[in-house]
Structure formats: structure tokens, C-alpha cells
Image (spheres, rainbow, N blue to C red):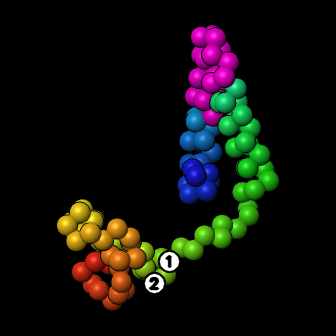
Amino acid sequence: MLSRNLPFLQAVLIVSLRLATDFTGCFYFLLKKKAGISRAIIKAGFAYLYWLLFCFNKKNNQPKGWNKNTGIYKGTILIPYFIKNKKKFSELVKNTTDAGNII
């Protein structure tokens, strides 16, 4: 999400521009008599503001895996997927010391 991943000043600028264009689009769709789309835009704007006020500081409990460089596959997955028939990511990175496949 933009608010979480950008520095504060950039986030304020980009998110304010985003909300302004969203609400401009909302008025456009109201003029075109498409109230459902306008309602969805307004609902999304308020949901974002709710998240910003009440949920922003909650910890994201998803595992990251960046500390050990696991979960990063270097290269294309086309050959292993289509030719070697490896359908799962865990089959691609069986050994984390395989320097050819992992950064």
C-alpha cells in the first residue's frame, strides 16, 4: 500500500493526489448516472481513511524471508515450469545454498 511503503512526505503528496482523482472520478460517474461506481469509490475512500486512522500501526504478521534471502528466485521460471514441470515454488528453491537460483 502506498501509505505504508513510501516516505511520509511522498505518501502525503501521492495519496492526496490519488484521493483527489478518485473523488473527481466519483463526480464524473454521478454525472453519467452511474451511482454504483460512485458509491464504490466513496466507500473505498472511507475505508482507506478508516485504515489510516485505526489500523495503520498494527503489525503485519506475514513472514518476510528477506533476512536469509529465501523466497527470492533469480531468473526466469518459464523453463522450470513448462519443461521441467515444477509447479510449486518450493520445488524451484529446494536448497537455499544453490547460488544459481537464489540471490
Task: In the rendered view, tell whether residue 9 sits above or below residue 100.
Answer: above
Residue identifier under label 2: 68
Tell me how far mark 2 sits from mark 1, CA to CA.
6 Å
Query: Which residue type carries mark 1?
Result: Gly
Residue at image coords 65%, 70%:
61
Residue 81, percent from left and from top: 27, 65
Asked where in the image residue 97 lies, by quadrant, the reply is bottom left
How would you classify the magenta stretch by its main secondary structure? helix
Residue 4, percent from left and from top: 61, 56
Task: In the rendered view, tell whether residue 86 sits above or below residue 38.
Answer: below
Q: Which mark is residue 65?
A: 1
Query: Which residue type carries mark 2?
Result: Lys
Q: Quadrant of the C terminus?
A: bottom left
Pointer 2 and pointer 1: residues touching (CB < 8 Å)? yes
Residue 73, percent from left and from top: 34, 72
Query: Is 3 inside the magenta-drawn segment?
Result: no
Range of residues picked out in magenta? 19-37
**Dot 1 surroundings within 10 Å: few (below 14), some, or many (20 or more)?**
few
